[in-house]
Structure formats: C-alpha cells, structure tokens
Amino acid sequence: MSGLMRRLRAGIVGGGRGAFIGAVHRIAAELDGQALVVAGAMSADAATARSSAEAWYLERSYDSYAAMAQAEAARSDGIDFVIVATPNHLHYPVARAFLEAGIHVVCDKPLAFTVAEAEQLVALVEGGKPLFALTHNYTGYPAVREARALVNNGALGELRKVLVEYNQDWLMTPLEQAGNKQAQWRTDPARAGVSCCVGDIGSHAENLLEFISGQHITALCADLTSFVAGRRLDDDANILLRLSGGAKGTLVCSQVACGEENALSIRLYGAKGGLEWRQQEPNTLLYKPPGAPWQNLRTGKNFSDGAAQAATRTPAGHPEGYLEAFANIYRAFGEQLRGGAVLEDEPGYATMDDALKGMNFLRAALESSRQGAVWVDL
Amino acid sequence: MSGLMRRLRAGIVGGGRGAFIGAVHRIAAELDGQALVVAGAMSADAATARSSAEAWYLERSYDSYAAMAQAEAARSDGIDFVIVATPNHLHYPVARAFLEAGIHVVCDKPLAFTVAEAEQLVALVEGGKPLFALTHNYTGYPAVREARALVNNGALGELRKVLVEYNQDWLMTPLEQAGNKQAQWRTDPARAGVSCCVGDIGSHAENLLEFISGQHITALCADLTSFVAGRRLDDDANILLRLSGGAKGTLVCSQVACGEENALSIRLYGAKGGLEWRQQEPNTLLYKPPGAPWQNLRTGKNFSDGAAQAATRTPAGHPEGYLEAFANIYRAFGEQLRGGAVLEDEPGYATMDDALKGMNFLRAALESSRQGAVWVDL
Amino acid sequence: MSGLMRRLRAGIVGGGRGAFIGAVHRIAAELDGQALVVAGAMSADAATARSSAEAWYLERSYDSYAAMAQAEAARSDGIDFVIVATPNHLHYPVARAFLEAGIHVVCDKPLAFTVAEAEQLVALVEGGKPLFALTHNYTGYPAVREARALVNNGALGELRKVLVEYNQDWLMTPLEQAGNKQAQWRTDPARAGVSCCVGDIGSHAENLLEFISGQHITALCADLTSFVAGRRLDDDANILLRLSGGAKGTLVCSQVACGEENALSIRLYGAKGGLEWRQQEPNTLLYKPPGAPWQNLRTGKNFSDGAAQAATRTPAGHPEGYLEAFANIYRAFGEQLRGGAVLEDEPGYATMDDALKGMNFLRAALESSRQGAVWVDL
Amino acid sequence: MSGLMRRLRAGIVGGGRGAFIGAVHRIAAELDGQALVVAGAMSADAATARSSAEAWYLERSYDSYAAMAQAEAARSDGIDFVIVATPNHLHYPVARAFLEAGIHVVCDKPLAFTVAEAEQLVALVEGGKPLFALTHNYTGYPAVREARALVNNGALGELRKVLVEYNQDWLMTPLEQAGNKQAQWRTDPARAGVSCCVGDIGSHAENLLEFISGQHITALCADLTSFVAGRRLDDDANILLRLSGGAKGTLVCSQVACGEENALSIRLYGAKGGLEWRQQEPNTLLYKPPGAPWQNLRTGKNFSDGAAQAATRTPAGHPEGYLEAFANIYRAFGEQLRGGAVLEDEPGYATMDDALKGMNFLRAALESSRQGAVWVDL
C-alpha cells in the first residue's frame, strides 16, 4: 500500500440517531484503522444532526449536505470521502453535490430513481476521479469472494441452475401505519422509489448472483405482490431468471416471510460442481463436487482465493460477520483511494456499472410484474 | 381395527432384481406386520421373475401380470392387493388388469399417460370397491402430517408464500447413454411419458405442497430444460405458482443439481407463522412464529396432531426415515382395506383424485414450457 | 447366501403390549424378509401374552418362556431363534433356557447380573452352537460401520482423543413414582441391576466407542449421580477414560439432560484425522482431515467400506433410521445362522465377548463411583 | 453515559506485526467510536515496534513499555488506558508498570505466574482506581449474556449437568519445532507458564462456565496430556468438575483435536430447562424446555436480557462475530472508565477476582494431573 501516511478523513450524510445503518457505516469505515469519520450532516433536522454528531465526537457538524460539501471541499484538512446513508430519494442529490465538489463518494443503493439522474452521476466519475462505490456489502464476505473465484476458475463447470433468495419478515404487518419510520419511507414511493422489496433486498440478491456467477441476467419473469393491505409498494416477489451464460434459476425475495430475519442465500449448480452459501452463517461455504462428499470450506482456513483470504481478519473459528464484510467494502475503497495496485476492473466494491445493472434489473422486474408476470429482457 | 385376523396377502408386479423400489415396497408393505408379500410377477423376463421371487421366498411366481391377476382372483387364498412397481408405461395396463379382477391396487405414480386411460381407471374404483392408492410416499412422514394439521388448524394464518423444491443430481451426466437401465427408461418418452424431471419428482413436490397447504395450484409458469446434451426429456424446471387460497410461490426441481441427493423441501409462510421441512432430516419440523423463537418440532415428541403421532413407531430421538414413511402409506391402505374407521375423504394415502391432479399439473407444466414459459391455468 | 430356502422362524419372549421395544425387535427381525416372528411368550401375564400374540397374528402363544423353549425345541417346524426382550433380570434365565434347548438367541443387554451367570451362558455357546447375539443396535448404522472401517484403515492415524455421549431426559422427573412402568423397572435394582443410566445407555456408548475405535477401555474414573430425589439408581454419569491404544477421553451419559431425546454421539481425534457422528441424524458422518475441509460422508453415497455399503437399503438422500440399523443386527445374525461366509471374528453383531466387556465396564464404573470417583482398571 | 466528551486515548504494549491478537485489540477498542489507539510499545524489537506503530498511524511509538508508562503518565494528553497484548510472561510486569503509573489496564490472561505477583496487582487496583480488566472476551457475546441471565432468572431451575468444551487443532503437529513463533512461546514454560492447553483455552472454558452458571468450580479431577512428542506443556485435557451449587460435569479442551478450529461450546442442564451455545455459530442460543420444542433464541431478536440486547449492534440476521464480542468488553470498560452507572459487581468484563479464579483453576488442574488425575479442591 502506498499513499497517505495517515487515516483517511470521512464525512457522513444521514445516519443520525435511530438509523442503524449510520453506525454500521461508521464502524465499517473505521474498522481497519484506515479512516476516521470526522464530519457529518447526519439529519435533515438540525438538532438531531448536532446531537448525533456529538454522540460520535465528530469534529464538524453541518446542518445541510450542501453546506458540508462546499465547506469540506474548501478545507485543507477536509474529508477525503463522504458516506451517503440517507433514504433513497436523497442518494442522487447528495452524491451529486459531493462528486461535483470533487469528493469521493460511498453511497447506499439505489444510485438514483431515473436513468437521467444516473447518467449525470456516471458523467461525474468518468476517468475515475472522483471515485464512487455502491455499498453492495454482502459481496464483502470472504466466502462470497471465494465462491466467485471458484466459479471463475471453472470449479463448477458450465453453470446450469442458480437459486438466490433474500427473505425477511419485518414488514409482515402494516408497520408503516403504526409509526415505524423505517417502514414509512421504505413503503413510500416518494422516498423509496418504485419498489420496496425488490428494490431494497431483491437488488442485493441480484448483485450477489451476478458477482458470484460472473454472468448477468438477460431475461426475467417477475411476480410481485403487496400482501399487506394498504401497502403501496411490493413486499414479496418470485422471479424466474435466465442468465447470459445459459443458466436458469429463480430469485425469491420477501419482507413478509414470517420468521425469517435476513435470509440471503445462494446456490449454484454447474456441470462439474455445486456451491451453497447462507448469509446468516457466513463463514461456511459448501462445495459440492460430483460423486464425492460435500466439503465445508471455511473462512480463514480453506479458501483458495487470495482476495478471499485477504478479506479475513481473524483465524478460522473466530466468526466474522456482517460488519467485517461491510468493512471489506471500505477497505477496498480506501486502498483504491490511496492509489493502491488494485485492478480497475475489479476494485473490490460495486461501481457505477453495477449500480446501473441494479437499476435495470429493478426496471425489468417492475415492468414484468405490471404486465402480469411476463418475460422481459434486460 | 376390525376385520381379518391374519396378515393381508400382497402380490407385486415389477420390482425384480436391480430395481431398488421393489424392495422398498415389500419392506413398507410388511413393516407393521399387517401384510406379507406372497406372490409376484416381478419381471417381464421370466427367468428374472422366478429368481427374484425365489430370493424373496414368495409362494407363487408368475410369468405375466395378466396371468397373475387371473389366477390370484380365482384362488380362495389369493392376494388381497397388488403392488404396481413397474416403469411408468405399465402402470395403466397393470392397474387395470387387477382392478378388473376385483383386486385392490397400490400403484406408483403416474396413474396413466392419457386422460382417457385415467378415466377408465377412475370408473373401475367408483364406489370404493376395489381400493386404489397412489404411492405419494413423502406424505407419510409424521412431520408432513403435522405440517398439514398446523396449516389446517390455522397456525400459519392465511398463506402467502410457498417454496417447494426437489433437487437431485443423478442425471447430471448422460447416464442413459452409458447403459444405466433406470436412466434409460426414465428418459425415454415411450416408457416414462412426457416428462422426466417434472413427472418423476416435480409431481412429488406438487403433491406435497397441496397435501400440506390444503390448496391447489390454479396457475403456473414453467421453464423446463434438458441440460444434458441428447436428452429427450426435461431434467430441470423452475416454476412460478399461484394457489387457490391466494398464496404465491415457486416449485423448483432438478435432476442435474450437482451434489444433491434427494433434496425435497418445503417452506410455507402465512400471516401468522411459517413452517420448514426437509426430507433428508425428516424428523424436525421448524415452526416459525411471528416475533418469537423458531421451534424445532420433533417426531415422537412435539406433534399436536393425532395422525402425526399415530404415524410414529419409536420414541423421539430414534430417527425414522424413508421406509417408515412409505410404510405409513401401506398402513393406512391396510386399515382402509380391513374396513377400519378411517374417513373416506382423508384415507392417509393419495387417491385417484390426487392422481388426476398430478396428471393435470404435469400437463400444464409441459404446455407452459412449450409455449415459452407462459402462464397456464390448471 | 446359502442354506434354508425359506424365511427363518423366530420367537419372542417379552415385548408385549406397552413395551415399544417388542415391536422394534419384530420389525427389525422381519425387515429384510429373511425371518418371520411366529411364536411368543410375550408377557408374564397370560392374558396380555395372548392378546399381544393375537395382535401380531402369531401362530403360537405360550404362557411361559420355559414352556415355549421346550415346545419349540420339540417341533419339527419350531423356531430357529428366539428374541429376548424382557426387563433385565430375566435376560439370564430366558437366554439360558433357550440355549439349553439348542435354540439360537438374540438378547437385549445386559447379558446377566453376575459373573457366574455370564460364565454359564458363555459355556453354553462355546463352539458356536447355538449362536448368541446381544443387541447393541447402534453399531448397525452404516455410518458407524464406515467409521470403524476408517479407523481400522488408518485414516485417523493414532487415536488421541475420544468423546462419546448418550444423553436423554426421560427420567428428569420421578416418573417411577408416578406409575410409569418402564421407569419403575429401570430404577428398581431387583429388575434393572446395579445401574440405571450407565447400565442402560452408558453401556451403549461404551460398546459404540470400542466398536469404532477398535480399542478397549483400560481404566476409568466415574462420577455417578442420582439427581432425582428418592431414585435408587444412578441417572447421570461423567467418566474419564483411558484406552488400550493410548487415547484418552470422556464418556458422558444422562437421563436427566433436559431437552435431549436420544443424543448418542461420538467424536474421535487421531494424529491424522477426526470423525464425528450423531445418532439423531445418522446418515452423515463428518470426516475432518488435517488442514483441509470437513467432508460430509453420507449413507448410500460416499462410504468406502463394503460392510457400510451393504448395510444400506436405499439410495442416498432417502434417510435410514433406527429401525434399519436394528435390522442390520438381525440381518447379520440371520446370515450367520444360515451358515453364510461371514467371518466368525466379526459377525456384524455383538457377541458374548462384547457382553462380558459391557459387564466389566459397568462393574468398574460402579466401583469407581462408590469409592469417590477414583481410577479403576478394567 | 456521562464523562469525557471525546474518544478515550488508548495505548498498546505488544501486538506488533505478525501477532493477530494486536489487531483484534485495536479493532475491539475502537469499534464503537469510544476510543482510539494513539500510542504503543508494540514490540521488544525497536524496529518492529516503530514499523508496527507506523502501519497503524499511531501518534507515539516507544521502544519499551517502561518508557511508555512513564511518558504517557506525564502528558496532559496521555493515554487513558493501556492494552497488554504480550506473551504471558510479560503480563505481570507490564500491567504493574502501568497500574503504578495510575493508568487503567486491559490485559490478556493470565494475570500472572505466581500468587505473589497476583497479590501485588490486586493491591494496586484496590478501591477501583485504576481500573483493571482481563479479556475473557467470549463472555462478550450477546448470547452468552442471555444465557447468564436465563440461568440467573431461574429458567433452568437447579443446575445438574454442565458440559463445556474448547477444542482446536493448531498444535496437532510440533509446530514449535518448525519455527512458528506463536507455537514457540505457547509451549515454552518460561514464556507461557505452567500450561499450554489448559492455560490458554481451558481457562476460557472455565471462565465461560462460571460466568453463565453463576457457580464456581469446587473440585476437579484433571487428566492432562502432551500428545505431541517433545512438547513440554500439555496440549490436551479431560476434566471432571463439581460446582458450588451441586452440578457436575466435564471440561474438555484440546489443541490436537484434528479438524477443530475454535470449538468452544457449553451445554447446561437444570431441573427445569437446558441451554446450548457454540462459539462458531454464536448468534443462536438453544433453549430446551422440558417436554416442549427446542427454541432457537437469536441475537438481536429474542433475547430477554437488557445486557444481552445492549450488546447487539445490528438487527437480527446480520451476524455478529468474534470482534463484536471482544468490543463489548472494551465498551463496558470504557463506560466504567467514563464513570457510568455500571454496577461495580458486574461491570461487563472480567476483573481481578475472575483473574484469581482462573489462576486457582489452573493450579488445581495441574496439581490434579501431576498426581495421576485425582480430585483436588479449589
């Protein structure tokens, strides 16, 4: 690693008191001792913004993201990058403000609501300055990196079947009518966008599938439902998939699957092997060779891939979790930012290209479902 | 139990040396000491038929099923029922021969290849004499009975999502071109019928889903594939489902899912609870109440339903398996045959009605897929 | 297989209505179609004996085991072997009566209460006529056979550590004071012998350990307890072990381990590998090579040993359970009885030698505990 | 929380390049944004100390811990507490130096090698100034906190049986003869103390057992072994236990258990319930009520205890791991240090009292084993 002989300075927009994802971003950004969050515009409410910043001992608190972008860009000790952890409808304007100020951006998905917005952001990062990362955090797990490497190295042979799922139950009742703020904006088209379930978690499943398989979805047939009465956006989906390399499969996601916490999983079957991974027990990757025993590949012990090994911080048997996986996204972003030797075409985090794929997937799923669950090409 | 004060006498057609399913039927039929297999026409090859019968110490061996039906019907100590364990194309003629001879029939699925054939068999069992059972054996597991009871009792509330799977890998290579007899007839349209994967195992998944959910499939969108080059029938399918009660879901089956043995599983999610069951560890039924811990319901210990309790032979912790589940089908059939108090509308085994549903499901899946995976009503 | 061209004829002593183990023996003996239970003295109560025999459609019912031994020995179509499924205190007199009548015996453990009794039985089977088997049924699991073969073939290297457990909870309350008949005789020194927990289930753990490891216990240090007030025999034990080959370990058993059903498990660690098996999910054997992924060896799929393969009846993924394992004991006994080619020194079931080892283990454990849990040599 | 409106300043002794535990301490200390490591004496080798400090962007690097203690105590912006992450033999002198300088100490176990040393350290923290914490990090898991609360609240009733294990395999070969530095000091009596396996991991098992059960070990019978030829300290142990409340059990630990990574587990059985927890899948706590289904209590979802809930950072299904558990020790220490309302008698981390218990356990185990595995009182 070359570059700055200091921790990077980070800022954050959103993530104030009550939003669990704010603390996740801070922990993940700081976990490897490579960055420190020093500034924030943590809430649209000025008092909340200030008290949130105080609770985090931030050096600088701003009342608006616009003021923050301007001020930080002007300081000699300004932030190196900003974290965008707001509700969806603010991703675009906030990311734009900082990119225009020349500040690197780490942004929650989705990138934007419209293709026009997305194209503006794409234009701002052309040439790689400033950098942009989308937090598809589940690809940060060492086992996911190993799975990608195994597929890429041909351990599975030609892929035939892929089964990816992301099931939760937190919206199985009309929480949004009971005052839950997370539920309110997630089910509000104005703030969440065109979709709740597919947009929020189906898109993670889609990204995970494409990351590991190295293939993209070429067509889908999506059956979306709002099971909870009065809900304005989907809370469940069953989707048939066809992939660029000839594989077929299903993508299943739900926010009304009673009893499920955060059940993201993927299974891949090829002509020469199978793989299975489950996010809730993330340190085991099941490898299924033909006619031979399943092997329990384990984080920190059996991974063949350099990137998977490097993504591990503790010896085998010391379980790593969600925060460590999230931190791997920040680690890769930090290394890139410091000018490290990471290859441009596989930086270790999701880029604008992935962001656009995700938007396209969402568009196709909504279009398919609206027409009665017909096949739509991507 | 009332009726005969002796073991029932059974005969078998098919199941000769080399066909594992023959021994399964014999063990299942005899397991509870209620029946004994005494006669057989165990192979189309006369020598194999005789040597197979000898190995089983059968009292009477026949060279043809037709001869057997005639002779047994004429004997005062003739068989009480016949087991049809032949390749698919013989189910119809064999079942017909014995039903016409007034002998009760236990038959492997599918019932027949055409609606006309099926209607003839239906006519033969009208009025309940003779009896007919289709061996949808997976519904014999105590945990499956309990799951059905829980759904029926409202423990899950209104069903929203159902995910049923049946994945294997035994046809992941062109076994049928390598001399494997099981693979040869399973992939041969003349002997297996219109489908390999959906017909052989998808139909079990369909039956399991309908048995537990108490709902029937009203529409489906099926994407069938033959992944192995040269194969004439499907070896994989991904299917979207809509059920009569408003639930949606997927049915996934495969015979090319590398590493999978006999991975039949079902998950159901309702407004008030969830359930999960996996055939390979069949003595645990996961019950997922809302906002409370998952409960590991266990065979022989925690089942609330009388039928589930009665289907168990050993104390909890003494694992029951495939053969015991299969034997429960025969036990229920035997009780019905002896004139027991079992209700006609839920005899504990699959009937002509279920057989027809299975044929309809298969028809719809094939039709959907042939048209490009469009929605087809059932 | 050579010998008789008919099913063997079996008799049973004990196992009348209410005793689950009676039905287990019948199912196990008949499962492979090699034997049929035709006669019985199923209860000391004559009426119960008759009604039990009737429920099983037995041809002959006796009021006493003595009368049965005499009568069956005299018949030309008398039983080939007898099953002893009585409470412990009757094992010796019943086994003796049939052995003296020249009838082969399959007997539940323990063999006897005293060394003198045991020696009399040993004398009766010298020369191998008649045959005697003790139903250490857990060694009948295919995975247990495979484990034994792996150890024997050196896959684990020199054994270092063995951990064997058998935990239940059925005696966690004073059931014997509440009228439970099983609990009454199990906790009654006159009928159960010197021990409840160690004698009933600890002895299975001991046998399993010696069967798989190929080593015998040379010394132990046993801490036995009666946790339930008023209980006259032990209901829990923790035991340190030293084995003949230098391995050390623990044997833990309990009948008061709340929530446990029939949690028999074994783990073995050698210089070159480890193994783990759990009776409640008996079709998976975990193999743990050094520095490489764990492998899930599976019944019917990955077993290297001929005996393990032969002990399997269904294709992989069709779970086999307790009854099938028990049936493997009877299958081996039947093959031996028919004069098959099975080696005398590994007949596939526990012999007098194993029975004596079990009695010695029990003696040592009780002696150790009475002296304050000191080391006792075997 | 009250007190300082800034992050705490931490220093570290040991933990330089190559020692994984150094990074673990830094991450754990900083994870909640409550502290920042700013100074270090990270190696006895001056160059390594400097380069390690540089890699961490520390503000101040020292060549010796003595110089560091003196200098930091003298600075107005000196460190608030020091982390002792050296090999065992340095714990005592380093802790002493900082405590004498009035600086709070977080120290790896063991506290010291002799009772005399321990008593000196005890004297230095009497009155609670400065504070001292021992990093028994496994008690930081939310599920462990919940287990303690359940036992304490009587959910298990009177404890009867406890089974605690900690098995690894990293020393199954003579790594210390192959140049592995970790293995060299761990197996060297001069640097590790009287024990390798029991001291390093058995002591964690002992602490976990006492933390959850609320009982202390009153007597033990320990069989320690050095399985690897030439090894000077134990690498395996099997120990019988008796606890202050009447429970009995076993403590098993090993560093030669082939295939095990970091298999710390505990099972507790009482008159009214059972519990099971496994460190490698730390977010599930199995609760086993009598006669009712097992319940999967889950981190972030079903925990009844306030301390267990507070120890969780992410919603259920976002797995937390080893680092988060470790961070909970630092969080509690920081809160105490800031003068928070935490009760003195349960501060959320292990204290001098626990440290002394651990030393006493180790003494008794060694004494027992040396005398041939006899019972020794604690």
Image: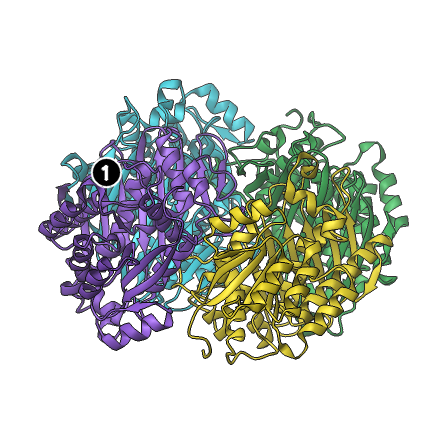
Chain colours: A yellow, B green, C cyan, D purple
Task: Report the quarter where the N terminus of chain B lies.
Answer: top right
Count neighbours of disc 1 (C-alpha within 10 A) and say few if under 14, some if 14 to 19, many if 20 or more.
some
Query: Circle 1 — which element?
Result: loop
- Residue nearest the viewer, comparing A225 with A158: A225
In this rendering, position of residue C191 left or right of residue B187? left
Residue indicated by mark 1: D216
In this rendering, position of residue C208 left or right of residue A146? left
In this rendering, position of residue D163 left or right of residue B14? left
- Residue nearest the viewer, comparing C48 with B112: B112
Q: Residue at x 38, y 23 (%)?
A: C175
Q: Specify the amino acid type for callout 1.
A: His
Residue D352 spot, x, y in % from top left: 21, 45
Visible residue check, residue B14: no
Q: Residue A241 falls in which quadrant of the image? A: bottom right
Q: Residue A103 falls in which quadrant of the image? A: bottom right
Picture layout, residue C178 above or below residue D62: above
Q: Chain of mark 1?
A: D
Residue B368 spot, x, y in % from top left: 85, 57
Q: Residue at x 34, y 45 (%)?
A: D338
Residue D202 spot, x, y in % from top left: 25, 52
- Residue nearest the viewer, comparing A155 with D47: D47
Picture layout, residue C199 above or below residue D201: above
Visible residue check, residue A169: yes
